Amino acid sequence: MSINTDQLDYLAKLSMLLLNETQKKHLHADLNDILQLVESLKNINTTDVEPVLNPLDATLTLRDDKVTEENNREFYQETASLSDNGLYLVPKVIE
Amino acid sequence: MFNQSIHSLALKLADKEFSSVELTNYFLKRIKAYDNTLNSFISVNETLALSQAKAADLLIKQGNYHPLTGIPIAYKDNFCTQGIKTSCGSKMLKNFIAPYTATTINKLNQAGMVMLGKTNMDEFAMGSSNETSYYGAVKNPWNLKKVPGGSSGGSAAAVAAQLTPCAIGSDTGGSIRQPAAFCGLTGLKPTYGRVSRFGMVAFASSLDQAGPMAQSAQDVALLLQTMSGYDANDATSINLPVPDYLQNLENNIKGKRIGLAKEFFDTHLNDDIAKQVLQFANTLKGLGAELIDISLPNMHQAIPCYYIIAPAECSSNLARFDGIRFGYRDENATTLEAHYKQTRAEGFGTEVKRRILVGTYVLSAGYFDAYYLKAQKVRRLIKQDFENAFKTVDVILGPTTPTTAFDLNLKNQLQSDKYLADIYTTAINLAGLPALSLPVGQIDGLPVGAQLIGKLFDEASILNIAHIYQKESQHHLLTPTLFNE
């Protein structure tokens, strides 16, 4: 299985990655090489085999629906490059 | 202070042969002298380290200390450390100051360990040579033209060159064990869920584990004892008691059943490595263990399986890096979409982009069943192979890597060939099992590692066997002459 350049463009769009033409050329070749590596899985019989979602087949631990954390918005927002009054700032989205 | 195990350093601290401040200064001096050559550290925290050392000395003076109190350590730079840069070897986080500390590091801090700094790594833990780091490649202390392995290459090089007596790494497909093998160290990947992942920046959430890297199995056991345990902040942390790894170290290995899987000794494996690994097995037989031939029929599907699952999970985990709440931000974007695309294009390196794109593909509509779901089913088969094998053996033994450390800057290599470096390590992550790599020889001055794989939560058995072997052998005591005192 290999992908064409249109498919690569679509993947770049889904991944929110801007790629220039040189990068696209190299990544296209790399991706097809990697897809070739993983092709062999198709030949393995997995009829009635349960997929592994967690390596220990563990299920999610639940806890009581109680508030246990404090509001530290100002402290945790210090890592943002642009914020104002509790809001994260982004380029304008509404005209 | 040179080439001492943690165990030995702890005894000397207790005897007041030297203080933790003196010990810390010793390693800080060595870092200053040698790390320009190796590039194993991203950041060194001299002031913090010395204040932690002072506090440790006070605890030791008061007689109120832990076996790890006052011992210096380095942490791979994908562990969050409050108030200290946590870069994951990436431009994306080059200015990220973590607002909290990873549970694993908190536990070691509470034991009184002294943090020397954060070590270099392949970007976001993706790589097997420490060449994808934004901060440049790390060199192997045994031969500066060779890679130290990856992604915990900085941690491995720093311990091997004795810039720190021990370090913590992370392992998703071999990233503790492979650099441990390339650098002549003992490194352990615990059972999935044994050690908390809270505060360890996620690469592949169903595969990642934190683990210790040090000179010996005894040192690794000491660190693992403190690192392990349930953490309510990690939804995948397992609530099971932690055994006394140190007490079990000295157990007689007579009658221990050690499996040798033929799939590990395939055409990819260098002949000399095969000889040394089998010699290791025979030494264990001489110490009373029983060698049993086994098979892991689906082991060769581990690489294709891993290179679907790991990129898939990474593409999801790395979606959070969008320049809004933390990390690098493209300042010139005029639309939100351009902001995301440009920030991520500029912040991530090529290997990370490669894996995000592969991951996005295998999870996308129309391809999910054929790739990701299929890989999860093959993962079940790989897991079952190990479960079946462990019905007749206690531990499985094999090589860690197909070759010794390879050259830096290898040109014109296919991605698929690079990924084959992980051929003997990835199956273990897929099955969630614990595994340890230890040095068992050398070829042309480069260390050779062998792997011991245990049943789920049976780190005790693999540590025990490694320790008994290390009482008889000297390979783990060798240090690269370039960095000797």
Image: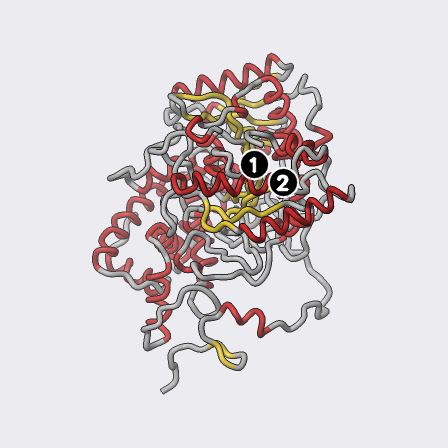
Which residue is more in the foreground, B129 or B290? B129
Residue type beneath disc 2: Ile
Quadrant of the snapshot with the N terminus of chain B: top right
Residue B141 is situated, as x and y percent measured from the top left of the image, at 42, 33
Evaluate whether residue B367 shows in this view.
no
Residue type beneath disc 1: Pro
Whether pointer 2 and pointer 1 mark residues with C-beta atoms closer than 8 Å, the reply is yes
- Residue linked to disc 2: B71
Evaluate whether residue A7 shows in this view.
yes
**Residue at 54% across, 23% down:** B294
Where on the picture, by quarter, is residue B347?
A: bottom left
Q: Is residue A9 above or below residue B189?
A: below
Which residue is more in the foreground, A44 or B224? B224
**Residue at 65% across, 27% down:** B464
Q: Is residue A39 above or below residue B452?
A: below
Q: Tag 1's secondary structure? A: loop
First in residue order: circle 2 vs circle 1: 2
Q: Which mark is residue B421?
A: none
- Residue linked to disc 1: B165
Q: Is residue B332 above or below residue B66?
A: below
Q: Residue furthest top?
A: B286
Where on the picture, by quarter, is residue B127?
A: top left
